[in-house]
Amino acid sequence: MILPSLSLADTMGWIATAVFVASYFFSRPAVLRGLQMLGAALWIAFGVLIASKPVIASNILVFSAAAWTLVRRRERSSRRSLDIR
C-alpha cells in the first residue's frame, strides 16, 4: 500500500480535524475546553499555512471562547471552595 504524500497544510488540517472530532467524546468540561483550544490552535496554524484570514479569525474566536469559559469555570469552583456556610 502506498500512502499519499500530504503537504504540511493538509497534515495540519487532518490533525486539527481529528482533535476536533475527538473533543466530542469527552464530557468533563476542562478536558473538552482544552481539546477545543488545541483544535482551534491547530486550525489557526492551518489557516496561516493556507493564508486564510477567515479560518484564522474564526478559530481565534473559538480559542478565546474556550479559554474564557475554562478560566471562568475554574474561578467559580475556586470561589465555591472558599465559601464557608
Image (tube, rainbow, N blue to C red):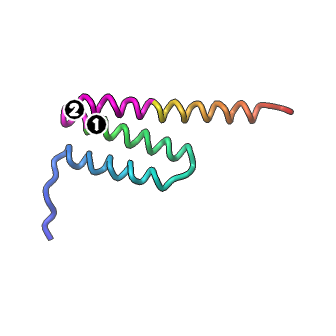
Closer to the N terminus: mark 1 or mark 2?
Answer: 1
- Considering only vertical position in the picture, is 5 above or below 55? below
Residue ranking furthest to the bottom: 1
Where does residue 71 sit, x and y in percent of width and height? 56, 32
Residue at image x 19%, y 45%?
8
The mark found on residue 45 in the picture is 1
Q: Is residue 48 magenta?
A: yes
Q: Is residue 62 left or right of residue 1?
A: right
Placement of the C terminus among the 4 image quadrants? top right
Judging depth in this view, the residue of 7 and 61 nearest the camera is 61
Residue ranking furthest to the right: 85
Where does residue 68 sit, x and y in percent of width and height? 52, 30
Which residue is identified by label 2?
Answer: 52
Q: Residues within 10 Å of mark 2 (few under 14, many from 20)?
A: few
Placement of the N terminus among the 4 image quadrants? bottom left
Residue at image x 61%, y 35%?
73
Q: Alpha-carbon distance for marks 1 and 2?
A: 10 Å
Q: Is residue 21 left or right of residue 51?
A: right
Residue at image x 19%, y 31%?
51
- The amino acid type, in three-letter code, at marker 2 is Ser
* Segment tinted magenta in the rendering: 47-64
